[in-house]
Amino acid sequence: MSAMREMIVVAAAAASCTATPAVPSVHFPNAPPVTLVDDHRDVPHPPEITLNLNHYSFYKRTVIGPITRALELPASPRALGVNALDDVPDSTWFTNRIGVRELSPDEIRTGPVTDEGPELHKPWTIRSTKPGGAELGFVITDARGIKYLMKFDSADLPELETGAHVVVNRLLWACGYNVPEDVIAYVRPSELLLAPDATIKDGLGRTTQPLDRFGVDQRLADAWRTPDGRLRVMVSRWLAGTSLGGAPVSGVRAGDPNDRLAHERRRDLRGQFPIFAWVDHVDLGTENFLDMWIDDPRHPRRHYVEHYRIDFGKTLGVMASTNHYPQEGHVYSVDYPDIARSLVTLGIAPRPWGHALAPALTGVAPTFVADGFDPGAWHPDTPYAPFDEADRFDKFWGARLVARFTRDQIHAAVEAGRFSDPRAVEYLTDTLVARQHATEAYWFARVNPLVDFDADDERLCFDDLAIDAQLAAADATRYDVTSYDARMRPLGRVAVAASPSGPTCTPALAKATAADGYTIVKIATSRAGFSGETYVHLARDPSSGAWRVIGVWRT
């Protein structure tokens, strides 16, 4: 059974419920979970390009979108792109990394980078100004002829945007998202040559006029330099393939037969919410997502679309500094409820921002703090359709990825930012760890946080993330475990005490004996201030006869 068919079976079963039975009317095929989606089929011609119409996009997302949602009937369909175990399979959008295996700090420090980068291959040749966006930058080639995008820090914000960009690039790569090969480098103005045919590009990437040395020097005058005169830059290796622009925030991309799930329904997009809140990735304009029509590396005559996240320079509180808008991360740039609140209270009601500031350290944005961080109330700069549709199950999935990072791994990601002040490295690491703990505490309290189910001939074992994260005490947690057959008739019930370390395992469970033994196990978790249920579906492997987990349904 294909990934799509499995998802449709589960979704259709959920949608067919007309009442609320004792056990959700959801069944799963007795098959291994899908781990890879078949979305690499040949796309012989580049699909339709998404134009970067910033003003129209802003109007649509901040004015039309909220009004349309307010007039619609409430509907919260569950996410698509989810396998039977409530996980996200690998695809052209997402590749499981930290969620399924241990990553060393060195792996995270390196992230997506595949070679030593351009710093060892000078001089660099400027080919054009950076297309799109407002930040200073150039398109360059190094001495090997490899093409890069080069961006700078502004003179009044040293190490801020470049550092945040690379740190978050590493963290998102580790989570599983496609990101470019971004590194920090240092270059002297004398090491920047100008191509004879260098040009100036406009916001849509169109050539407007030639670029001369005077124009380069004018632009470099606004860039921060080290005391010895070097320019600190972020260089991003140019992605292979044909650029299609940003992924549409809703619906699918016209002309891409592999793009079959509406983007606002995708778990890998909806589940970004707690991850982006963690790193304060507020800048979610279409230009910060990029779809590339690429050659299949295994079959060069075939092509498909790969989906990237790009441009992280406004994360870690930076956008509040560059936009002089301390509300970033707390409200939308046009936020109707906040406007109404200000009108009613004459603007004197207490606000959640501005109460804590980071220490004055080079490379650290003043507003990137852990004190007062509310993982559920965080907002991007503008509404984003997948987040508008996201439910607590999507956010629990993203929070699980955030929780997987150790302090050493986070520290390694921060080190990739090459900050000159060691105190900035420690502060950013400490703050990310504290925001990580807040993320765990918030989202693990809103879903029964049981994971990693494993069955044998008698027992069912699982981990409780709230206990693992020391958010709940094992001796104060109990599990009421009831098993049912495929027709949802009760078979047996046991009470289980939580294990203080390692997985909790049930005693022998009563299981169905008919056919493949399809059995549904309800695990009801209870502790002070929390109760929740998760349904785990078991069956015998038709080949080996061994019991296995074939589905997980959260309520």
Image (tube, rainbow, N blue to C red):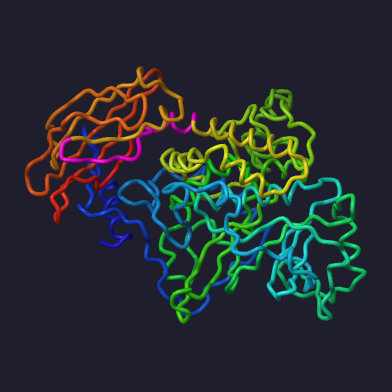
Q: Position of residue 227 (x, y in %)?
A: 89, 49
Q: Quadrant of the C terminus?
A: top left
Q: In this view, does 149 lie to the left or right of 437?
A: right
Tell me the residue at 13%/32% (across/down). 490
Say above or below: 507 vs 126: above
Tell which of 227 and 524 is nearer to you: 227
Farthest residue toward the left?
Answer: 514
Tell me the residue at 62%/57% (across/down). 310
Q: Quadrant of the N terminus?
A: bottom left
Q: Where is residue 208 in the image (x, y as percent from the top left)?
A: 80, 74
The range drawn in magenta is: 441-458
Tell me the residue at 20%/52% (across/down). 30
Tell me the residue at 45%/40% (across/down). 400
- The magenta stretch spans residue 141: no
- The magenta stretch spans residue 450: yes
Q: Position of residue 540 (x, y in %)?
A: 15, 48
Q: Position of residue 75 (x, y in %)?
A: 41, 44
Label count reads: 0
Tell which of 461 and 444 is nearer to you: 461
Q: Is residue 548 left or right of residue 118?
A: left
Tell which of 397 and 323 is nearer to you: 397
Q: Is residue 174 left or right of residue 455?
A: right
Say above or below: 506 vs 166: above
Res 257 quadrant in image: bottom left
